[in-house]
Structure formats: structure tokens, C-alpha cells
């Protein structure tokens, strides 16, 4: 039986050292790539986190603007209602004063007789023979 050692070509110490150096070099490259990948993932995570913060701030600002707009609409509507109530009250006061003036004037004016033109508008029954005389 041949031993495994006899089947392998003669490996010198320099080949072993070079092989070990190659392994160490590959391990360092792998570690370096892994480190770069982790840094990239952390950077992407940070960017996503910052994007979420910016989006949240934008949504909060938008909600604040909507709340301010709604508050402004409410104030305008309240002012509109107050103005309408004030105009209605002023109209009522004016109507009452006008009616009081008319009533006051009626108490001091003699009753007016209808004019000839107005008399022609009245529908009187025809005169009898006795009335025509």
C-alpha cells in the first residue's frame, strides 16, 4: 500500500508558507469585503432611517397646515355667522322703527280722502233713479 504522503508531490516548506500566506490573504480579502458590505448595509439603514424621519416630519407639517386651515375656516364661519346675526338684528330694529314711525304719523295725520282718480277705481253699485235726481 502506498501511503498518502507518497502520492503527494514533494511539498517544500516554501510552498507551505506561500499557501498559508495565500490563505491569510484570501481571509483578509473576505473580511475586508464583509466589512465593506456591513458598512454599506449600515449606511443604507441610516439613509432609510433618515428618510423615515424626513417623511414623518413632512406628514406632521402637512397635518399642522391642515389643522391651521381648518381652524381658519372655523373662525371665518363663526365671523360670517356673527355678521349675519348682526345684519338680521339691524334689519329687525330698522323694521320696528319704521313701523313705529308709520304708527306715530297715523296718530297725527287727519284721515285722507281718496282723490278723484282713486275714486274712479272704486267699484260702486249703479245709482238708483232717486239718487240720480
Image (cartoon, grey):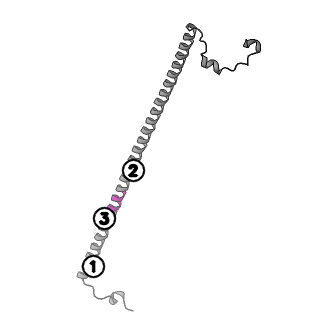
What is the x, y in percent for residue 21? 25, 75
Q: On the image, numbered disc 2 is attached to which residue?
A: 55
SS at circle 2: helix
SS at circle 1: helix
Image quadrant holding the C terminus, namely top right
Q: On the image, numbered disc 3 is attached to which residue?
A: 36
What is the x, y in percent for residue 68? 42, 38
Q: Closer to the camera, 77 or 34?
A: 77
Magenta segment, principal secondary structure? Answer: helix
Q: On the image, numbered disc 1 is attached to which residue?
A: 19
Which residue is drawn at the image coordinates 76% and 14% (left, top)?
129
Q: Residues within 10 Å of mark 3 (few under 14, many from 20)?
A: few
Residue that protrudes farthest toward the front in the picture: 133
How many angstroms separate mark 1 from mark 2 (CA)? 53 Å
Image quadrant holding the N terminus, namely bottom left
- Residue 111's disc is none
Q: Closer to the camera, 56 or 28?
A: 56
In the rendered structure, the answer to whether residue 2 lies left or right of residue 77 reads left
Which residue is drawn at the image coordinates 39% and 52% (left, top)?
52
Give the total of numbered labels: 3
Which label's residue is closer to the chain start, 2 or 3? 3
- Please report the bounds of the magenta region as a residue range: 38-45
Depth check, mark 1 against mark 2: the one in front is: 2
What is the x, y in percent for residue 115? 59, 16
Please check the rendered image and state whether residue 43 is part of the magenta-colored stretch, yes or no.
yes
Amino acid at each position: 500500500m502506498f501511503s498518502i504522503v507518497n502520492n503527494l508531490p514533494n511539498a517544500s516548506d516554501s510552498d507551505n508558507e506561500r499557501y498559508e500566506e495565500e490563505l491569510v490573504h484570501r481571509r483578509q480579502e473576505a473580511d475586508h469585503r464583509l466589512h465593506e458590505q456591513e458598512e454599506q448595509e449600515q449606511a443604507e439603514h441610516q439613509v432609510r432611517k433618515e428618510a423615515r424621519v424626513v417623511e414623518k416630519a413632512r406628514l406632521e407639517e402637512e397635518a399642522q397646515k391642515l389643522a391651521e386651515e381648518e381652524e381658519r375656516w372655523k373662525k371665518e364661519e363663526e365671523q360670517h355667522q356673527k355678521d349675519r346675526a348682526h345684519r338680521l338684528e339691524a334689519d329687525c330694529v330698522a323694521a320696528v322703527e319704521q313701523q313705529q314711525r308709520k304708527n306715530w304719523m297715523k296718530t297725527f295725520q287727519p284721515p285722507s280722502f281718496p282723490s278723484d282718480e282713486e275714486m274712479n277705481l272704486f267699484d260702486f253699485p249703479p245709482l238708483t233713479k232717486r239718487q240720480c235726481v
